[in-house]
Image (cartoon, rainbow, N blue to C red):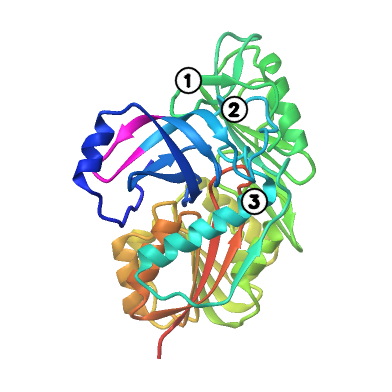
């Protein structure tokens, strides 16, 4: 967990006072990016996991830093207006979800507010662009799970890591998983008859088919297929694919739009979720991806769609980017959580594509990169998609255009 941004100066005497206290009372003002609540004790920022705006809490300090502290809830003295009993029986211990204690609609509103504040504060820009919020089902939406397990064949414990720990929390239910995936996960202890791995990745296809990795006797493996609009994508448990089954089309539409052109580039392309629809609007698409398994599926998916104008490059974006020609019509970037490497940001500024579409699940990384690109690219619009209900994460699609 990274250091939160705390812009206000802190009175050193308050910090000294806080070091002498283990328990304090705080009132939560708001959520910050990532989902923690922010309260203050005599001006010192206190970040409290699983708190709700408006909560008055008795908390225990668990981490002290020069400008802030983290705390855990001991008692809810007065609940905030949006607090509710968590629907899942495992929420108190499981580390998978962090916002089940908030009403579904309130989660989205507070996450968008927190992301917007992070973009304003950390980018250094005056952001005044059209914005849109997209939400879908808040339960039984997830297509993927990474399971932890231990124990003996036939009597395995299957679940997730606990909060702030690597202790296994066995589960009897997981209501954020799509129903076929939840049913499989809850039956999995009986299916592991020969070997119990420490970790198992599971993903769900469009017809209810499942893929597991690593391969184990009696468990389904290999590729599964899911349609997004009129395109079919094959992938398996070893590859990345967006997790919210109900928002795949909305995400794709928010990213691709309707503009046309000659040459487009899809960087960090995965199995081609954006490359394929892009190829219907641009004469030539170059898709760059470093994961060998994803590259194989990307090529297969392009062939299945009869898209002969997709060139697949098996390379890390950081080592390939200098080969991209200047003044491309369109570049899509969907980098890992830490955002764009410094070299990639510099190359984009030097090569000046006409348009950049940036997909991010980390507001701080996106803010840094928008600020870095701003001298050459103007932000034109933002779409917030709640692809991760019951968690503090939020997907953001930013549209940028080259400045004249």
Give the mark, 3 or 2, whose residue is nearer the N terminus.
3
Assign a secondary structure to mark 3: helix
Place residue 310 in its image quadrant. bottom right
In the rendered image, the vertical position of residue 382 relative to residue 96, given as above or below: below
Foreground tag (3 vs 1): 3
- Assess whether residue 62 is covered by the magenta stretch: yes
Q: Residue lying furthest right in this view?
A: 207
Whole-number angstrom distance, CA of label 3 to CA of label 1:
30 Å
**Drawn side of residue 236 relative to residue 404, left or right:** right
Determine contact: label 2, label 1, CB under 8 Å: no
Crowding at mark 2 (Cα within 10 Å: few <14, some 14-19, many 20+): some
Foreground tag (3 vs 2): 3
Q: Which residue is mark 1?
A: 167
In the rendered image, the vertical position of residue 205 relative to residue 334, given as above or below: above
Q: Is residue 315 visible?
A: no
Q: For the N terminus, which image quadrant?
A: top left
Q: Which residue is mark 3?
A: 106
Residue that appears at 56% across and 16% down: 196
- Assess whether residue 97 is covered by the magenta stretch: no
Q: Residue lying furthest bottom in this view?
A: 404
């Amino acid at each position: 967990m990274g250091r939160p941004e705390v812009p206000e100066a802190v009175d050193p005497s308050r910090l000294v006072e806080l070091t002498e206290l283990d328990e304090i009372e705080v009132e939560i003002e708001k959520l910050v990016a990532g989902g923690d609540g922010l309260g203050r004790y005599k001006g010192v920022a206190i970040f409290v996991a699983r708190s709700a705006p408006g909560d008055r809490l008795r908390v225990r300090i668990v981490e002290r830093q020069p400008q802030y502290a983290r705390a855990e809830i001991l008692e809810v003295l007065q609940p905030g207006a949006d607090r509710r009993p968590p629907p899942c029986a495992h929420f108190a211990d499981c580390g998978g979800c962090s916002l089940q204690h908030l009403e579904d609609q309130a989660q989205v509103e507070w996450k968008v507010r927190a992301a917007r504040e992070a973009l304003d504060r950390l980018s250094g820009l005056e952001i005044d662009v059209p914005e849109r919020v997209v939400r879908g089902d808040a339960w039984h939406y997830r297509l993927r799970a990474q399971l932890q397990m231990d124990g003996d064949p036939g009597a395995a414990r299957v679940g997730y890591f606990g909060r702030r720990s690597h202790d296994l929390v066995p589960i009897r239910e997981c209501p954020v998983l799509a129903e076929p995936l939840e049913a499989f996960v809850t039956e999995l202890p009986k299916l592991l008859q020969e070997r119990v791995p420490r970790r198992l990745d599971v993903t769900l296809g469009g017809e209810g088919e499942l893929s597991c990795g690593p391969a184990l006797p009696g468990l389904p493996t290999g590729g599964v297929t899911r349609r997004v609009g009129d395109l079919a994508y094959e992938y398996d448990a070893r590859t990345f694919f967006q997790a919210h089954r109900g928002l795949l089309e909305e995400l794709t539409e928010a990213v691709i739009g309707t503009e046309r052109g000659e040459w487009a580039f899809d960087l960090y392309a995965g199995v081609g979720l954006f490359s394929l629809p892009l190829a219907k609007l641009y004469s030539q698409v170059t898709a760059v991806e470093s994961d060998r398994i994803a590259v194989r599926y990307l090529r297969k998916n392009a062939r299945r769609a009869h898209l002969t104008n997709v060139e697949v490059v098996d390379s890390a974006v950081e080592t390939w980017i200098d080969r991209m020609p200047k003044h491309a019509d369109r570049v899509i970037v969907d980098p890992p959580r830490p955002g764009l490497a410094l070299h990639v940001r510099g190359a984009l500024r030097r090569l000046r594509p006409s348009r950049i579409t940036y997909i991010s699940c980390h507001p701080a990384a996106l803010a840094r990169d928008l600020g870095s690109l701003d001298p050459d690219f103007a932000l034109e619009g933002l779409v917030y998609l709640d692809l991760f209900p019951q968690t503090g994460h939020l997907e953001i699609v930013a549209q940028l255009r080259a400045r004249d």
